[in-house]
Amino acid sequence: MCMTLYEPYNDVSSDSESFIIPNLPGQIKMTMMQLPPSIKCKEKTGMVKFVEEAEMRSYGVVVNSFYELEKVYADHFRKVLGRKAWHIGPSFLCNKGIEEKAHRGREASIDEHGCVKWLDTKKLNSVVYVCFGSEINMSDSQFRDIAMDLEASGRQFIWVVRKSKKEGLEWLPNGFEKRMELLEAVTAGFLMVTWPNGADQFYNEQLVTEVLSIGVPVGATKWVRLEGDNITWDALEKAVKRIMTGEEAMEMRNRTKVLAQLARRAMKEGGSSSSEMNALIEELNSLSH
């Protein structure tokens, strides 16, 4: 919202020059290359126009997050920008049973129990989980490079890939047809190597690496539509090493453990998310009378 209201990108001389997002807690820096192409358009059309207008007209926002994760920004949104918001997540914690969790997302193409059994044989915090999400399209050469580099690193890993009918992708190993969102990673107590490509991912990277300090950036610098930003193996290896070993990794892991506990506490009766859900229901009921 601050980006839309103040348009700080108009004050830079190049797409690679960084700027600070104004009227926002902290020194959040971005560049034009990290923003969607539509933001440069003075006359918004289509879905972009619809979303921006709906945001300004809306009575409030229901957020699938928990207050303790981003309380400074939650307070800023409510008190400074004067907008209503209710943090009622992480909503996936409502799926308590194994069967309920198994049916979230798409069906896996391998035996999940076998995967868990394999994980149980590995040392704690020794396996790298690799997932680029369902919206990112990388070239065959990029996938091959990542696959070979992961193999050459000598680190145990699980790589989630989606099936594709496109020729040239048959060589890819089968994997889980599921996602790993930022909120799920936090709730699980995972550290992250961030590799943003578009949408809100560069904003999320700032939250993970600069605000919460529970992850490290791999070095992606620009918004891309079809293929991921080219990242060297050296950069990827250094980022993975930072979250796997050393004092920095231990400090980040301690922080994410605290956040994981807060996330689960928020969803319990009397927790922040449970209380905000009750407040939301009460407010909506009051509007109907």
Image: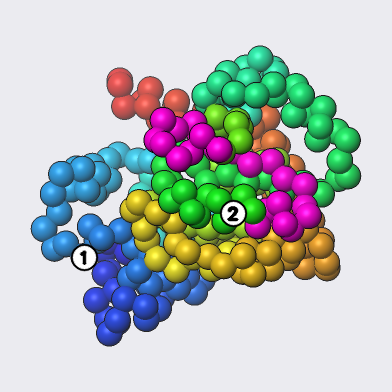
Residue 15 - label: none
**Type of amino acid under label 2:** Ile
Residue interval drawn in magenta = 149-171
| Marked residue nearer the N-terminal end (1 or 2) | 1
Image quadrant occupied by the N terminus: bottom left
Q: Is residue 224 left or right of residue 140?
A: left
User: Viewer-proximal residue, 217 or 130?
Assistant: 130
User: Can residue 270 be spotted in the picture?
Assistant: no
User: Can residue 130 be spotted in the picture?
Assistant: yes
Note whether 261 is above or below 27 in the view shown: above
Residue at image x 70%, y 37%? 265
Image quadrant occupied by the C terminus: top left
Q: Position of residue 133 (x, y in %)?
A: 50, 42
Note whether 247 is above or below 125 in the view shown: below
User: Viewer-proximal residue, 109 or 180?
Assistant: 109
Residue 40 - label: 1
Q: Position of residue 188 (x, y in %)?
A: 70, 40
Q: Is residue 188 left or right of residue 37?
A: right
Label pair 1/2, CB-CB below 8 angstroms = no
Residue at image x 56%, y 38%? 172
**Type of amino acid under label 1:** Lys
Residue 146 - label: 2
Q: Nearer the viewer, mark 1 or mark 2?
A: 2
Q: Position of residue 174 (x, y in %)?
A: 60, 31
